[in-house]
Amino acid sequence: MKNYFLSALLALTFLGCATHIHPLPKWWTHTPADSAQWLYGIGEGSSLDEAKQQALASIAGQLETRLSAKLSVRTQETNAAFDQYADRNIRTTVADVNFSHFQIIEKDIDEHKQRVRVLVKLNKPALANAWQQQYDKLATQVTSAEKKQPNQSVFDWWRKARGQLKSAARADSIAMQRSILQDTPQPSQLLAHLRKVIKAIPLTVKIEGDNDAINRRIIDLLDKKDLRASSCRQCALILRYRTKTDYEVIYNQQVATMQFFGQLVDDRGVLSESHWRMQGASISQRQVAFKAASALAADKITQQGLWKSFGLTKGSNGYYQ
């Protein structure tokens, strides 16, 4: 009798659990095949938005797989430079995909487990067209920045061209996305081309200053902008500055107050001016206080930015460089 009741209890327990089993919808186990018009993806999450994001991530994963397969087969006609660029940026590109023109066509809610499942379909031609419009807009901006106007100084042109590097990189990324989406080779090398154009019109730079620590820091910052300081006679840009240091004793410490007077000069004259100060202290010697003030001044130039330290404000394109 005891065994009978135990068996009955187990059966009822199993039956109770079975009532909570949520059947999976057919579209979840048999996802529709992709077509020329649509891409499909399924996703699951604790909310509708989370499930939708998972479905779109699934579609992005499909695109990444396609790109990997494409790049694994090399042909003589393939541009090697583009291959290398694509290899380096494959994951970044797919992670940056901005999907639009999609819709949730199926939804399943498991209330017991508080899970939501969705089936999403994405309109390939509509998305490709939207990406093409984005690309064309960015490419127009980049191409316009490449052209140096007759009355434009080299430094002004260089700053605006440099300001479009991110746009060029974004355009290349969009072109790659569209290429994967439509299975058509549409390589874009706007970034590489813009860098080549910038390099072809060199910005000659000279430093005219009286502080070794500051000079070294300026050289380092110029190097990060792919610029080199030189002793050119007619330079496109001159970073001119002087410092004045006063000393005083405060609380038994030697305090050096360094004033910085800076100018940016291009072939049209003085572009900007700046005046700021920095203090360094030492418990022993003036020379140590001077070195401290110099090091702090160099750090300020790094933190504030090279051009801004010389008084240059942001231009209409929003970039200092």
Image (spheres, rainbow, N blue to C red):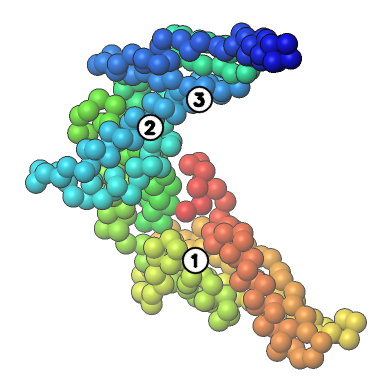
Label 2, on which residue? 61
Mark 3 vs mark 1: in front: 3
Residue 179 % position (x, y): 26, 31
Foreground: 71 or 201? 71
Which of the 4 image quarters holds residue 280? bottom right
Mark with earlier residue (2, 3): 3
For label 3, the crowd category at 10 Å Cα-Cα, with few meaning under 14, some 14 to 19 and many 20 or more, is some
Q: Amino acid at mark 1?
A: Leu
Disc on res. 22: none
Whole-Å distance between the Cαs marked 2 and 3? 12 Å
Q: Is residue 125 left or right of residue 247?
A: left
Which residue occupies the extreme bottom position in the image? 285
Foreground: 215 or 84? 84
Label 1, on which residue? 221
Residue drawn at 64 percent across, 76 percent down = 295
In this rendering, the answer to whether 166 lies above or below 128 is below
Which of the 4 image quarters holds residue 205? bottom left
Q: Is residue 321 left or right of residue 50?
A: left
Disc on res. 53: 3
Residue drawn at 38 percent across, 39 percent down = 93
- Residues marked 1 and 2 touching at CB (< 8 Å): no
Mark 1 vs mark 2: in front: 2
Foreground: 90 or 47? 47
Instruction: State the SS at label 3.
Output: helix
Residue 114 % position (x, y): 63, 17
Q: Amino acid at mark 3?
A: Gln
For label 2, the crowd category at 10 Å Cα-Cα, with few meaning under 14, some 14 to 19 and many 20 or more, is some
Whole-Å distance between the Cαs marked 3 and 1? 41 Å
Q: Amino acid at mark 2?
A: Gly
Instruction: State the SS at label 2.
Output: helix
In this rendering, the answer to whether 190 lies above or below 41 is below
